[in-house]
């Protein structure tokens, strides 16, 4: 058996000598081919490969490693690394576990790029399945010497050039990881600094801490967090703050399309678990409104899916204007760009903004968002609270239900925006129920409301356009308002009648006596952005008021003509039509000059107006045509020869 031992000793010695004198450069080709197959692109090794096996912790170095771009990204290299040094523990390796004692990169130069279609040269997937977040094996010591990183994102308009270093040394200052650099985001200055804890003697069971500071134009983001499992970037958490002039500007940093907003200041806890991003404990202010809630974004599918539950204790209504491209009113929190928009609209005496809708961002994400405002202030009408649920799926946005609470009554309905085509299409159907006229039109003369009563209504509009103004400027549909019953100061009823002597006398004496409004109806037919009101009637005790007019939503101007018909013979009467015209925001009241109109037109007015009105009343509520007040007015029209026919009720949505 001695000769067997001798032979084995000779063989071991021969293998040892072979390993010692072996030229490891022979393996450069096979190693490069294996790396190329794993990364789905060409990897080359231009420098020497050295391996040191005689240790419980074998090591290797390789120089001149180059990683090519995918074919569509051009001929430049994605990465050019001067040297890679690796040291690995042998015992865990024999059991199938990779445990690196050292991973060191010397002079790595990495160029990352994403094109306008969203293709990224750092996506190493085979195209059949999504690329996964970077997840490295446990590394005891991680060192980067003189690293350079450039990033260009054509989709977000971001460019960045920076340095990456990790220079810890035993007995040294124990400096941690640091990446700093600058560039541009949408042509605004972009500055980034990320500082991490020491990368020497890393404990894989302890979270790895990091801090980040980002500036993009006037947007500032800070973060302080940790990676629970070092080198597994699929998981991390951080406390973050963000402030800036517009939430929509965060798209360049996050890739999540957010609505336009006034200046904001927010804080939250952000966490990531592979494809699930969560924002918890969200709080802060947007404009003059508070905001709180939670958000989650799930990636990995065809489109990110955003879910959000948001709240505001006190919503400042003008802050919502920025969502649609407008701006808060003077004196409110607003960015310079929004102030410019507000000045332009004010100079043109308009209220519908022209800001172009970014349809590409709407198509890029799905969402399910709930928002509730416990109270609302500074609204154009007296709103108490409100809520909306918005669902976005494959480019179709649906706000359903929309609910706005008045002191009495509600506005409810839904709005749909279809952005699948080049030009978005908007449909809205809103209902007003159980409201009060004096609350929606809070006019006070002589210390009292000149009119009051219940008010119901409905608006159905269909418009095409990539801005709020364009959509309304060509809208078609109908709008209707009905006052089933109420009261008006007798002075105004007499003036509209027109009994000038009696009406002026009651006004000058500040007489608060009222007369009933039996029924009031206004029906608008929208054609190509113009609301035509051919049927307006208000029936009071002494007077029947009729009228017609238009509201042009393209020019945002209105023109109305109101005519009173006395129900009683007047010794003194001057039946001059009353006009209301001018910009919607600042209409002027006047009297149309010309020939006075003879008395006694009640029968004619009833016969010509009430038939079409009876047909459209069911558009709001099938019961209105049978309402005690409006129903009796319809019956009176029949007595005067009006061929009243009720249309079938329009189905509620």
Image: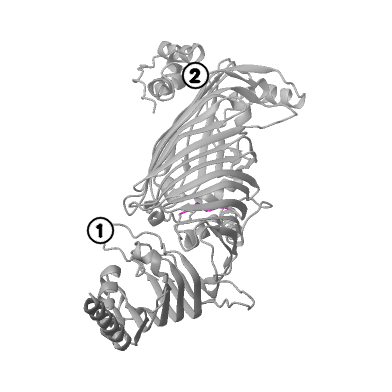
532 is higher (above) or lower (below) than 236: above
Asked if residue 162 shows in the view, the reply is: no
Q: Position of residue 33 (x, y in %)?
A: 25, 76
**Main secondary structure type of the part rendered in magenta:** loop
Mark 1 Cα-neighbour bin, 10 Å: few <14, some 14–19, many ≥20: few
Is 446 positioned to the left or the right of 266 in the image?
right
Is residue 258 on the magenta stretch?
yes
Residue at 70% in and 18% down: 513
Total numbered circles: 2
Find residue 292 and report its image quarter: top right
Is residue 389 on the magenta stretch?
no
Q: Position of residue 171 (x, y in %)?
A: 63, 78
Determine whether the residue tagged by mark 2 lies in a helix, strand or loop.
Answer: helix
Q: Position of residue 314 (x, y in %)?
A: 65, 40
Residue to which mark 2 is pinned? 602
Q: Foreground: 68 or 508?
A: 68
Find residue 188 and report its image quarter: bottom right
Among numbered discs 1 and 2, the one appearing first in the sequence:
1
Mark 2 Cα-neighbour bin, 10 Å: few <14, some 14–19, many ≥20: some
Q: Position of residue 510 (x, y in %)?
A: 76, 24
Q: On residue 128, which mark appears?
A: 1
Is 139 positioned to the left or the right of 375 in the image?
left
Q: Which residues are magenta?
A: 257-261
Q: Foreground: 372 or 17?
A: 17
């Amino acid at each position: 058996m001695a000769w067997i031992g001798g032979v084995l000793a000779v063989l071991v010695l021969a293998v040892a000598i072979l390993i010692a004198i072996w030229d490891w450069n022979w393996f450069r080709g096979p190693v490069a081919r294996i790396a190329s197959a794993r990364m789905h692109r060409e990897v080359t090794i231009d420098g020497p490969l050295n391996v040191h096996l005689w240790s419980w912790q074998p090591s290797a170095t390789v120089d001149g490693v180059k990683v090519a771009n995918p074919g569509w990204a051009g001929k430049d290299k994605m990465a050019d690394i001067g040297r890679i040094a690796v040291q690995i523990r042998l015992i865990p390796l024999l059991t199938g576990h990779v445990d690196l004692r050292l991973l060191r990169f010397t002079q790595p130069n990495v160029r990352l790029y994403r094109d306008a279609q969203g293709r990224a040269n750092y996506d190493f997937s085979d195209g059949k399945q999504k690329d996964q977040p970077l997840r490295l094996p446990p590394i005891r010591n991680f060192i980067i010497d003189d690293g350079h990183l450039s990033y260009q994102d054509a989709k977000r308009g971001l460019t960045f050039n920076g340095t990456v270093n990790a220079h810890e040394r035993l007995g040294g200052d124990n400096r941690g990881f640091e990446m700093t650099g600058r560039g541009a985001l949408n042509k605004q200055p972009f500055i980034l600094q990320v500082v991490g804890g020491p990368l020497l003697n890393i404990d894989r069971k302890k979270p790895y801490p990091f801090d980040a500071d980002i500036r993009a134009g006037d947007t500032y983001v800070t973060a302080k967090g940790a990676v629970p499992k070092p080198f597994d970037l699929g998981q991390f958490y951080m406390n973050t703050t963000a402030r800036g002039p517009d939430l929509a500007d965060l798209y360049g940093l996050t890739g999540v399309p957010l609505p336009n907003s006034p200046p904001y200041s927010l804080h939250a806890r952000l966490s990531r678990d592979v494809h699930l991003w969560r924002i918890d404990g969200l709080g802060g202010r947007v404009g003059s409104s508070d905001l709180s809630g939670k958000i989650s974004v799930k990636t990995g599918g065809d489109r990110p899916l955003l879910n959000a539950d948001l709240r505001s204790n006190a919503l400042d209504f003008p802050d919502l204007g920025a969502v649609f491209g407008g701006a808060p009113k003077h004196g409110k929190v607003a960015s310079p760009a929004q102030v410019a928009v507000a000045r332009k609209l004010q100079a043109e005496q308009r209220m519908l903004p022209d800001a172009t809708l970014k349809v590409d961002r709407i198509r890029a994400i799905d969402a399910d968002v709930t928002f509730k405002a416990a109270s609302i202030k500074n609204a154009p009408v007296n709103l108490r609270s409100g809520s909306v649920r918005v669902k976005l799926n494959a480019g179709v946005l649906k706000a359903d239900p929309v609910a706005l609470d008045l002191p009495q009554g509600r506005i409810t309905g839904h709005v749909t925006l279809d952005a699948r085509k080049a030009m978005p299409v908007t449909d809205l159907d809103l209902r007003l129920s159980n409201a009060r006229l004096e609350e929606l039109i809070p006019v006070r003369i002589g210390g009292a409301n000149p009119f009051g009563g219940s008010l119901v209504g409905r608006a159905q509009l269909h418009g095409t356009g990539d801005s709020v103004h364009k959509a309304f400027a060509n809208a078609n549909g109908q709008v209707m308002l009905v006052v089933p019953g109420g009261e008006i100061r007798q002075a105004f009823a007499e003036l509209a009648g027109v009994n000038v002597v009696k009406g002026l006398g009651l006004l000058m004496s500040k007489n608060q006596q009222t007369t009933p409004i039996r029924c009031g109806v206004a029906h608008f037919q929208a054609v190509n952005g113009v609301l035509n009101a051919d049927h307006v009637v208000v029936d009071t005790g002494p007077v029947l008021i009729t009228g017609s007019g238009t509201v042009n939503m393209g020019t945002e101007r209105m023109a109305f003509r109101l005519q009173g018909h006395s129900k009683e013979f007047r010794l003194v009467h001057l039946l001059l039509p009353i006009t209301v015209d001018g910009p919607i925001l600042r209409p002027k009241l006047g009297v149309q000059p010309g020939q006075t109109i003879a008395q006694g037109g009640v029968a004619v007015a009833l016969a010509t107006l009430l038939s079409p009105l009876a047909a459209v009343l069911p558009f709001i509520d099938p019961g209105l045509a049978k309402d005690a007040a409006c129903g009796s007015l319809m019956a009176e029209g029949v007595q005067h020869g009006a061929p009243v026919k009720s249309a079938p009720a329009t189905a509620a949505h």
